[in-house]
Image (spheres, helix red, strand yellow):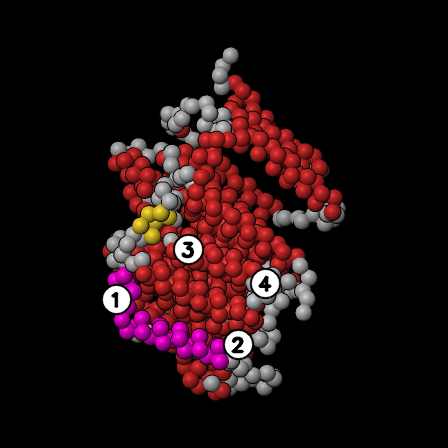
């Protein structure tokens, strides 16, 4: 709760920086504030308090995810310095980023559907604006508009679902809904419209996490939005959306999982196959990462399908590993895309120029592909193990198969990077200190988590 | 008189006007039907004893937002040639998908009649009771809505202002 208040106030204060002329202090202020918020969140560990007539519930699950998204934002700030130092609307950018984070924190900690909706809307509306924040680029405008229209449509489904659930349970409170679902399910009297409500909420949430067949917006929006915002969307926002998804289904609808688990299992299989197969044929690195993030959404959905006692830890570990890997990959993409297009060919000759950094990028790509001993492998292992225990063997087989497809295009990045530079290339991708720092941190963290994955996984088990 | 008669009249009217919003050829007619639709939905709020919600609904939707719609319509050039054309395959797929959704939603109302009414007090929708709920149980979401509005405002200003420097 303290972390939430600090982030919200920080957003308001950064907004004032334009009026009261302390724009130079903007970046240090945001960093200090976020560090404080992260510290406060970690300080509340093991307290599990319900605030304001059970509107938010900061248990270990939400505290872990809150700290994770704050840390990811801090890491993201390393490469996005330019976005806050030279840009003419930097104060607004900082404010919107902080409000997005605020919405994300609410989404990890809500204990009432009304709070969930408020959090989701704060997060989404800031993102619609941020996606189109490159005002003079038509593609960015299109991305923002597309995201806005599709997102509002999906929110409509989510609200309809909430209304049906409220009609049945007569409460927005997650605990009360869970009690209602449990008692009616025990007598076999679950009304039909609870099922419809669950399905409609699932549609809305699956749009937000870009699961197939609701993924069509993702590649276009990820490609059109400024690269830094894409990195933010693919990591912080996706983590928050999954935290909300898992929290809702594990708290409320576990007793009727016989109804939705099969559906979700099929959707998760379709999502990872779609993401991985379509990523293979991409020539733009940004689009490839967008499709890869769709595929990773499929793996994280598997943890919701499994819904047993290791799933909470597994989805946390997966979100961490995936976000760290994506941040590193986007840092590289940001460095090479400064000189025009985002084609994967720009990576040619990268290894010859920057041996160490190419190695670190290799580690990150291995983590995304799920090759041991890096974090991604153990994240996938725990997810697969949980699904296997819940008797979805076929889903594990599909997941392994689609991971193999994934290895193909991830290795294409490594192979392109060690090829000699093409003669046409006139500009060399150059890494700035910030990009190097982020690459180093995310690669080291990926290795560290790979060496001792049980720590993160055990936090929530 | 059957006590649920007003409901059925209002429901028929709102479904009819909502259909006409989609079906009418002229955009201005669509907007007028939409206003009518909002009024009938406001009538439903009155039937549910939510007088304040009724007033707010009429003022905000039928008043402010519809005027905005009409203004926007005047700015847009509505030509036959500019209308987007979808292939028959897409139209067919959309019809089937929407029909399936309708089927599921209608099926979901099966068994809804057996549920008891939750509250029968007549003053549930008054301003004072709404205020008690907003400043009591729902204090936190009510306060956080201000962040939401602030976000929308900051975003609109950022997208709308000219770049200087």
Q: Residues within 10 Å of mark 1 (few under 14, many from 20)?
A: some
- The magenta span reads A433-459
Please tell me which of labels 1 and 3 falls first in the chain: 3
Give the labeled residue for mark 2. A335
**Residue at 57% from the left image edge and 34% from the top image edge:** B56
Q: Nearer the viewer, residue A28 or A265?
A: A28
Q: Nearer the viewer, residue A280 or B16?
A: B16
Q: Within the image, what quadrant is residue B16 found in?
A: top right
**Residue at 61% from the left image edge and 54% from the top image edge:** B156
What distance separates the C-alpha of mark 2 from that of mark 3? 32 Å
Which-is-in-front pick, marks 1 and 4?
4
Which-is-in-front pick, marks 4 and 2?
4
**Residue at 53% from the left image edge and 85% from the top image edge:** A421
- The answer to whether dots 1 and 4 both sit on one chain is yes
- The answer to whether dots 4 and 2 both sit on one chain is yes
Question: Is residue A450 in sight in this rendering?
Answer: yes
The answer to whether the residue labelled 2 contacts the one labelled 3, judged by CB atoms less than 8 Å apart, is no
Residue farthest toward the front in the current orientation of the protein: A20
Mark 4 falls on what kind of element?
Answer: loop
What distance separates the C-alpha of mark 4 from that of mark 3? 24 Å
Q: Within the image, what quadrant is residue A188 found in?
A: top left
Give the labeled residue for mark 4. A20
Q: What chain does badge 1 belong to?
A: A
Mark 2 falls on what kind of element?
Answer: helix
Please tell me which of labels 1 and 4 falls first in the chain: 4
What distance separates the C-alpha of mark 1 from that of mark 3? 28 Å
Give the labeled residue for mark 3. A4
- Taking the image as shown, residue A295 lies to the left or right of residue B9, namely left
What distance separates the C-alpha of mark 2 from that of mark 1? 33 Å
Mark 3 falls on what kind of element?
Answer: helix
- Taking the image as shown, residue A26 lies to the left or right of residue A43, namely right
């Amino acid at each position: 709760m303290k972390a939430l208040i600090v982030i919200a106030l920080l957003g308001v204060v950064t907004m004032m920086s334009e009026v009261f002329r302390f724009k130079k202090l903007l970046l240090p202020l945001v960093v200090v504030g976020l560090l404080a918020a992260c510290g406060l969140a970690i300080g509340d560990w093991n307290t599990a308090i319900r605030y304001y007539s059970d509107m938010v519930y900061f248990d270990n699950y939400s505290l872990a995810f809150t700290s994770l998204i704050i840390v990811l934002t801090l890491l993201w700030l390393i490469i996005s310095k330019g976005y806050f130092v030279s840009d003419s609307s930097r104060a607004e950018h900082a404010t919107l980023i902080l409000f997005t984070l605020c919405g994300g924190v609410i989404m990890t900690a809500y204990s009432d559907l009304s709070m969930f909706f408020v959090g989701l809307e704060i997060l989404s509306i800031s993102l619609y604006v941020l996606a189109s924040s490159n005002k003079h680029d038509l593609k960015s405008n299109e991305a923002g508009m597309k995201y806005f229209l599709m997102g509002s449509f999906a929110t409509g489904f989510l609200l309809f679902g909430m209304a049906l659930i409220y009609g049945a349970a007569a409460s927005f409170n997650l605990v009360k809904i869970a009690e209602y679902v449990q008692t009616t399910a025990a007598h076999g009297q679950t009304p039909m419209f609870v099922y419809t409500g669950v399905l409609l909420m699932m549609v809305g949430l699956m749009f937000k996490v870009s699961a197939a067949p609701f993924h069509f917006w993702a590649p276009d929006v990820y490609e059109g939005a400024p690269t830094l915002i894409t990195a933010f969307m693919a990591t912080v926002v996706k983590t928050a959306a999954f935290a909300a998804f898992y929290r809702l289904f594990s708290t409320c609808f576990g007793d009727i999982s016989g109804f939705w688990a099969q559906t979700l299992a099929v959707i998760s299989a379709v999502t990872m196959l779609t993401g991985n197969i379509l990523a293979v044929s991409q020539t733009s690195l940004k689009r490839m990462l967008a499709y890869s993030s769709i595929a990773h959404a499929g793996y994280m959905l598997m943890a919701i399908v499994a819904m047993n006692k290791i799933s909470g830890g597994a989805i946390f570990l997966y979100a961490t590993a995936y976000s760290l890997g994506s941040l590193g990959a986007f840092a590289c993409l940001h460095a090479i895309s400064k000189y025009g297009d985002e084609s994967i060919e720009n990576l040619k000759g990268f290894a010859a120029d920057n041996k160490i950094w190419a190695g670190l990028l290799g580690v990150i790509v291995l983590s995304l592909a799920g090759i041991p001993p890096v974090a991604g492998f153990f994240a996938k292992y725990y997810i697969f193990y949980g699904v296997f225990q819940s008797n979805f063997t076929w889903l594990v087989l599909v997941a392994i198969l689609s991971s193999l497809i994934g290895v193909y295009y991830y290795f294409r990045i490594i192979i392109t990077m060690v090829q000699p530079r093409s003669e046409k290339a006139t500009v060399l991708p150059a890494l700035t200190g910030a990009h190097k720092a982020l690459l180093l941190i995310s690669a080291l963290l990926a290795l560290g988590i790979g060496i001792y994955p049980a720590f993160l996984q055990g936090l929530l088990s | 008189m059957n006590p649920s008669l007003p409901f059925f009249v209002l429901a028929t009217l709102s479904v009819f006007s909502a259909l006409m919003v989609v079906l009418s050829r002229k955009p201005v007619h669509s907007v007028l039907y939409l206003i009518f639709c909002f009024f009938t939905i406001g009538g439903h709020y009155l039937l549910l004893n939510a007088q304040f919600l009724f007033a707010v609904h009429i003022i905000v939707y039928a008043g402010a937002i519809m005027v905005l719609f009409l203004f926007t319509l005047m700015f847009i050039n509505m030509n036959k040639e500019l209308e987007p054309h979808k292939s028959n395959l897409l139209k067919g797929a959309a019809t089937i998908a929407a029909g399936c959704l309708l089927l599921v939603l209608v099926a979901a109302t099966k068994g809804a009649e057996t549920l008891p009414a939750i509250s029968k007090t007549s003053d549930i929708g008054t301003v004072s009771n709404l205020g008690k709920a907003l400043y009591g149980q729902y204090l936190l979401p009510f306060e956080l809505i201000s962040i939401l509005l602030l976000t929308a405002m900051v975003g609109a200003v950022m997208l709308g202002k000219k770049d200087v420097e």
